[in-house]
Image (cartoon, coloured by chain):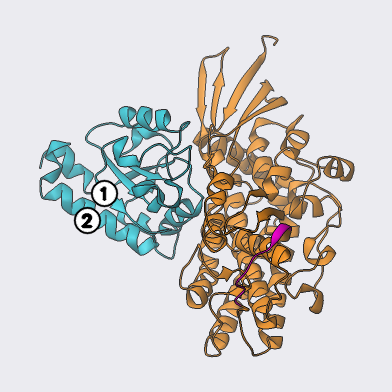
Chain colours: A orange, B cyan
Amino acid sequence: MSNNRSTIPIGPYHPLQEEPEFWKLIVEGEKVVDVDVRIGYNHRGIEKISESKSFDQSLFLVERICGICSSSHPIACAQAIEDITGTEVPERALYIRTISQELERLHSHMLWVGLAGHFLGYNTVFMWGWKYREPICDIMETVTGNRQNYAMHKVGGVRRDIEKEHIPYILTRLDEFLKHLDMLKGAVLDDPVLHARLKGVGVLTKEAALDYSALGPTARASDVNIDVRRDHPYGVYDRLKWNVITQKEGDVFAKAVVRILEMYESASIIRQCLDKMPDGPIDSKPKDISQGEGIGVIEAPRGECFHYIKCDGTNSPVRHKIRAPTYMNFPTFRETVIGETVSDATIIMAAIDPCYCCTERMTVVDHKDKELLKAQDLIRLSQEKTRKIKEELGAR
Amino acid sequence: MGLKEAVLTRSINVFHVSSGSCNNCDIEILDALTPRFDLERFGVTLVGSIKHADVMLCTGSANRQTVPIIKNLYEQMPKPGFVIVYGACGCSRGLFKDSYNTLAPLDEIIPVDAYIPGCPPKPEATIAALVKLIGKIKTKKAEKI
C-alpha cells in the first residue's frame, strides 16, 4: 500500500438483515480506490435455530430476520412450506398477503427517503419521511395489532382478517399518506440541488447490475427489468394492474426515483386489493407435511427474497436456507463507490438501502495525519457538499 | 442526588448501541425521536459518540463478536451513566436464546438500569422508560452507580 493511501473502516457491525458487514474503504486523498468487506457480526444462527423449531414457530423466527421485512420473510417461508405440502391458500388470504406486502413496501421506501435525506443534509426530508410513514404504521397496527413484527402470516393462510369496518379507515389513511407523498415527491425530485448532488453519482451500469445479480430497486434503477411480482407471480399480483418502474441511469438519483414512483404503484395495488377482495375463509388449516423440498420467492422492498426448505416428513425442517436481497445488492457497492469521493460514499452506500446503523458507526482513520473522523463527520462532509452546490446554484 | 445526577435529569444524551438486533428496535427508537412522538422536545438527543453519552441504549441479543465491543463501550461511557436495554432480545435474548452465537443476556454482560420489553417496544414505551429512569435517578437509587 502506497503512502498516500489511507483506510476508512465502516462498521464493524450494523443490524441490517442477517448479513451485517464491515467495509474498509481505501482512499487516496478524497478518492475511493478500493473497498474490502468482512462479514459475520450480526450472526444469530437463524437457519440453525429454524431446524429446531416446528414449521409454525419458524414463521415467527424468520419474521425477526429483519425488522423492515417482517412481512416478506414469513410469506416467503410460508410459500416454501406450502410448496412442499401442496396446500392451496384461500383467495382472501392471498389478497391480505398482497396488501400487507405492499404496506410494508410503502413504509420501507418512505423510511429510505427519510434516511437518504438525512445523509444529504436535508434533515427536513428526514423528519418528513418518518412523520409521513406513521399512517402506514397506524394501518398496520389496526390490521395486525402491532406497528412492526406483524405476526400476520401462517402456513396455509393468514392469522387475522381485515375487518370490513377497517377498510374505510385504511383508505382514509392511505389518502393522507399519498397527499404527503405528492408533496415529498415534488420537494425531492424537482429540487435542482438534489439533481446536481445525485445525478451521475455512484452509477451502476446495466452490465454491472447483471454481473453482480443486483435485485429489486437497485437493479431496476439500472434498466434491468426484473420484478418477482411480475416474473413469478405470487399472491394476487397477476390479477392486478400495475407497472414495474425502471430507470436508465443507474445513479443514486435514479434509485430514488424508482423508490418514490414504486410507492404510487404500491398504493394503487392496495386500493385494487381492497376493492376486489372476495369473502371467504382466510386459512386452509393444513395438518400434515410430506417429505420433500420447497422454495418460496417474493419481492421484498429491497428485491428478491428467497427461502428454501427441505423436510423429511417430521415437524421441523432438515435444512432452511434463506437469501435476503441485500446479500446480492451489497457487492454492487464496490462497483459504484470506486472513483467517487468520500463525501459521496455515504449516499452511495445508502442508495442500495442498507441500514442506517452502518453509516452511523463510520469512522475515518487517516494514518498519515493521525486524523480521526466519525460517522457524524462523514455525514457532515456529505452535507457540506450539498451546501456548496446550493451556493453555486444560488439557492437559499 | 448529587449535582451530576441532577444535571442528568434535564436533557439526556443517548448513545444507541445495536448488538445484533433485527433493526426493528432501532427503527422504533428513531421513530420516538421524529415528529410524531418527538422525544427531542424533552431534550433527548442521539449522540454519535459514547463519550458524549448519559445513557447507553442497547438493542439486540449480544453475540460472540459484539460482547467485547459492548464491554468496551460501557467502560468508555462517562460515569455516572445509565444503561437501558431495549427490546426482548436484549432483555432475555428472546427467540435467540437457543442460538449457538448468543452467549448471555445483556444484563449479565454489563450492569443494566432499566429494561424496555417488547418486540419491538412501542415509542410510547420508550417515553415511559425515560420518565421512569429520571424518577429512579431522583429517588437516589442511582447513587450506587
Q: Is residue A21 left or right of residue B57?
A: right
Whole-percent x, y for residue B19 in the image? 44, 40
Task: Indicate the secondary structure of the residue bearing disc 1.
Answer: strand
Lateral position of residue B43 relative to residue B139, left or right: right
Name the residue carrying label 1: B114
Q: Are marks 1 and 2 on the same chain?
A: yes
A65 in relation to A363, above or below: below
Q: Is residue A20 visible?
A: yes
Q: Main secondary structure of the magenta part?
A: loop
The amino acid beneath tag 1 is Ala
The image quadrant that residue B14 belongs to is: top left
Q: Callout 2: 10 Å neighbours few (<14), some, many (20+)? A: few
Q: Is disc 1 in contact with disc 2, using a CB cutoff of under 8 Å?
A: yes
The image position of residue B49, as x and y in percent, is 41, 34
To which residue does mark 2 refer?
B132
What segment is highlighted magenta in the picture?
A: A285-294
Determine which quarter of the picture holds residue A348. Answer: top right
Query: Which of these two is toward me, B102 or B75?
Result: B102
Mark 2 element type: helix
